[in-house]
Image: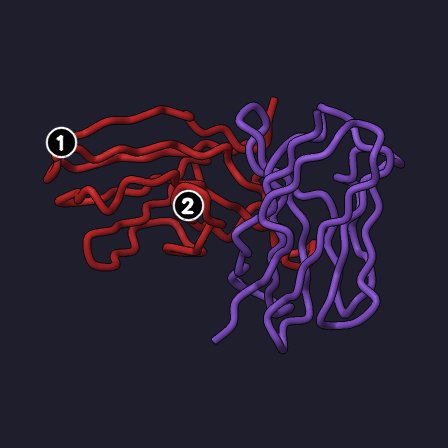
Chain colours: A red, B purple
């Protein structure tokens, strides 16, 4: 079993839809939770991060963490075609330097 | 501001050849990471360095892979001999080290095809 599971998609939604992207993890040592966005033929870039259970909002994006269920989510409101990308969750434990464990990524397409 | 710079952007070579991928991290960053990304396995950490010293190379698939960081501004990942199953996109990332969340900044990758 992988440490981090993420549905690869692809996920196709109409413009303006609310998008929900999710990851589950098995290692309770993970304490820091990140979402990276990767456009085609580019490297991933950090979108949001959090280290506590609950919600964190940044504009149209909300990151949600449920440590008891080992479940993290990224919600995108009023999705735009420019949000079309692959979204990867990334998790970090307090020890181990800055080593991240990534999900495989969910490919999202927002259509006009 | 210059980001992480990788070269070459694309590499096509025949199996058995030596391949060298290069990375220049962001100035001032003291952690450097090499990743491999494929459709099947996603983004896998191969090796990472702190202050030019390899800290964790448990992700290096086999002895054909080697990585060096001779100074704070340059790193290489070498595959010798290369095999078709090494075909993937290889990313380099750099960050500051420390507690908490230190964002990793990625280059745009090297797309490697081994024929």
Q: Earlier in the sequence, mark 1 or mark 2?
A: 1
Evaluate whether residue B102 shows in this view.
yes
Looking at the image, residue B49 sits to the left or right of residue A20; the answer is right
Q: Nearer the viewer, residue A109 or A40?
A: A40
Q: Is residue A67 above or below residue A95?
A: above
The circle drawn on residue A14 is 1
Is the residue marked by circle 2 packed among few (<14), some (14-19), or many (20+) residues within 10 Å?
many
Q: Is residue B83 above or below residue A18?
A: above
Evaluate whether residue A29 shows in this view.
no
Is the residue marked by circle 1 packed among few (<14), some (14-19), or many (20+) residues within 10 Å?
some
Under circle 2, the secondary element is strand
Looking at the image, residue B2 sits to the left or right of residue B34; the answer is left
Residue drawn at (52%, 52%) of the image = B108
What is the quadrant of the N terminus of chain A in the image? Answer: top right
Residue B46 x, y percent position in the rendering: 72, 43
Q: Is residue B29 above or below residue A26?
A: below
- Judging from the image, mark 1 belongs to the subunit labelled A
The circle drawn on residue B78 is none
Residue A100 x, y percent position in the rendering: 59, 49
Residue A41 x, y percent position in the rendering: 45, 43
Residue drawn at (59%, 65%) of the image = B95
Residue at mark 2: A38
Looking at the image, residue A80 sits to the left or right of residue A71; the answer is left
Residue A52 x, y percent position in the rendering: 41, 54
């Amino acid at each position: 079993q992988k440490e981090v599971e993420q549905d690869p998609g692809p996920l196709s939604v109409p413009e303006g839809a609310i998008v929900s992207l999710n990851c589950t993890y098995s290692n309770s040592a993970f304490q820091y939770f990140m979402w990276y966005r990767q456009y085609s033929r580019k490297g991933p870039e950090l979108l949001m991060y959090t280290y506590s259970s609950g919600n964190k909002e940044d504009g149209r994006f909300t990151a949600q963490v449920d440590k008891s269920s080992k479940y993290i989510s990224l919600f995108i409101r009023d999705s735009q075609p420019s949000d079309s990308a692959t979204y990867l969750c990334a998790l970090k434990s307090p020890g181990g330097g800055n080593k991240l464990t990534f999900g495989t990524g969910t490919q999202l397409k927002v259509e006009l | 501001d210059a980001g992480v710079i990788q070269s070459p952007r694309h590499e096509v070579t025949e199996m058995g050849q030596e391949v060298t991928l290069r990375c220049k991290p962001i100035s001032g960053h003291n952690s450097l990471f090499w990743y491999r990304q494929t459709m099947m396995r996603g983004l896998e950490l191969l090796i990472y360095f702190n202050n030019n010293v390899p800290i964790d190379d448990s992700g290096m698939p086999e002895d054909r892979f080697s990585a060096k960081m001779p100074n704070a501004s340059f790193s290489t990942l070498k595959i010798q001999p290369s095999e078709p199953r090494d075909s993937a996109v290889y990313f380099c990332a750099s960050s500051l080290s420390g507690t908490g969340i230190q964002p990793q900044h990625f280059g745009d990758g090297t797309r490697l095809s081994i024929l």
